């Protein structure tokens, strides 16, 4: 962005803010709208308003608020037009080109794409409140100034978003060139119920599961449908799940905490190889 016409002191302030905050703001906007190009445009617009502003006491906070407000306006407009960020070619491409994630331990682009399938179930206000609070640690009072709602209302929106993400995981498989595996869909449905018996019904009697941990802790291995289902119920209950082919991603809020690779046979899950970040587990989802 050209700032040549900006007065000297303001130009210096603009340049400092641009170099210090731009990458963070694009990340914030991208989390909200789920589209990198739209996020870049939102940040450009926020800096244009910043350049035109006379006095800004706290540039970082001001830019965050303006960027989030621009993103909220975009989501509202998209909802009015019945457009969904998760249906954009960028997100679909990320889902369809996911590599084998058996050893994936970071929230890479493919996992982010899967997450936006989940976030697209929320209203614009829920989505903004949820992302700003859970991912960027803004207070509900700060979010209220952005959304024009009360702090109590934004707290309710964030809590409602968590409940919806936990209770309505998207039952979606996206292996190119082949139909979705019914065993995976049944597995996701059973996980959503939180019922051990329902999970057992999706597993082979001699199923096994292995969990490897990003912290280097010893792996956990379970054998037999009941043991595997009981362990899964312990760490997947309340999580938001989405699937790409035979790979299931688990999120606590907007934070990835597990990738599960399922092997199926005769319509049932035969084995589960999981990579888990235990530092996220046990956090307060409400």
Image (spheres, rainbow, N blue to C red):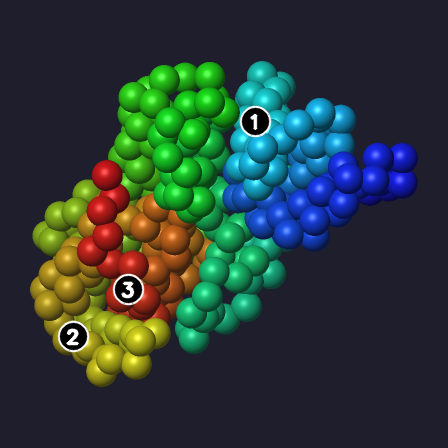
Residue at 39 percent across and 57 percent down: it is: 256
**Residue 249 drawn above or below residue 143:** below
- Decide: few, some or many residues near mark 2? Use Cα within 10 Å; few <14, some 14-19, many ≥20: some
User: Which of marks 2 and 1 precedes in the sequence?
Assistant: 1
User: Which of marks 3 and 2 precedes in the sequence?
Assistant: 2
Q: Quadrant of the C terminus?
A: top left
Q: Which residue is mark 1?
A: 69
User: Which of marks 3 and 1 precedes in the sequence?
Assistant: 1
Q: Which residue is mark 3?
A: 279
Q: Residue furthest right?
A: 5
Q: Position of residue 22 (x, y in %)?
A: 66, 48
Of residues 273 and 250, the one nearer the viewer is: 250
The reply to whether dot 2 and dot 3 touch (C-beta < 8 Å) is no
Of residues 110 and 35, the one nearer the viewer is: 35
Q: How far is the residue under mark 1 from the one under mark 2?
A: 47 Å
Q: Position of residue 131 (x, y in %)?
A: 44, 39
**Residue 15 drawn above or below residue 6:** below
Of badges 1 and 2, nearer the viewer stands 1
Residue at 38 percent across and 27 percent down: it is: 141
Residue 86 in view here = no
Q: How far is the residue under mark 1 from the one under mark 3?
A: 32 Å
Residue at 28 percent across and 64 percent down: it is: 279
Indicate the quadrant where residue 265 lies.
bottom left
Q: How far is the residue under mark 2 from the one under mark 3?
A: 21 Å
Residue at 11 percent across and 68 percent down: it is: 227
Disc number placed over residue 222 in the picture, else none:
2
Q: Secondary structure at mark 1?
A: helix
Of badges 1 and 3, nearer the viewer stands 1
């Amino acid at each position: 962005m050209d700032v040549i016409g900006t007065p000297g002191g303001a130009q210096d302030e603009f340049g400092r803010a641009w170099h210090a905050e731009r990458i963070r703001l694009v990340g914030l906007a991208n989390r909200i709208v789920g589209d990198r190009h739209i996020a870049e445009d939102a940040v450009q617009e926020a800096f244009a308003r910043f350049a035109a502003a006379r006095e800004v006491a706290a540039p970082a906070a001001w830019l965050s608020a303006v960027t989030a407000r621009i993103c909220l306006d975009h989501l509202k407009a998209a909802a009015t037009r019945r457009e969904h960020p998760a249906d954009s070619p960028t997100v679909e491409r990320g889902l369809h080109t996911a590599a084998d994630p058996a050893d994936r331990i970071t929230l890479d682009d493919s996992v982010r794409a899967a997450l936006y399938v989940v976030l697209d179930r929320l209203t614009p206000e829920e989505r903004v409140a949820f992302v700003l609070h859970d991912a960027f640690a803004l207070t509900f009072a700060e979010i209220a100034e952005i959304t024009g709602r009360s702090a109590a209302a934004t707290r309710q929106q964030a809590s409602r978003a968590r409940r919806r993400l936990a209770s309505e995981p998207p039952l979606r498989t996206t292996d190119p060139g082949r139909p979705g595996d019914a065993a995976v869909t049944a597995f996701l449905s059973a996980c959503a119920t939180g019922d051990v018996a329902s999970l057992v019904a999706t597993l082979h009697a001699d199923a096994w599961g292995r969990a490897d941990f990003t912290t280097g802790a010893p792996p956990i291995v379970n054998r037999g449908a009941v043991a595997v289902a009981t362990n899964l119920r312990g760490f997947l209950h309340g999580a938001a799940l989405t699937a790409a082919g035979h790979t299931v991603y688990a999120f606590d809020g907007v934070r990835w905490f597990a990738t599960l690779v399922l092997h199926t046979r005769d319509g049932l899950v035969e084995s589960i190889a999981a990579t888990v970040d235990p530092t996220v587990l046990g956090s307060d989802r409400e």
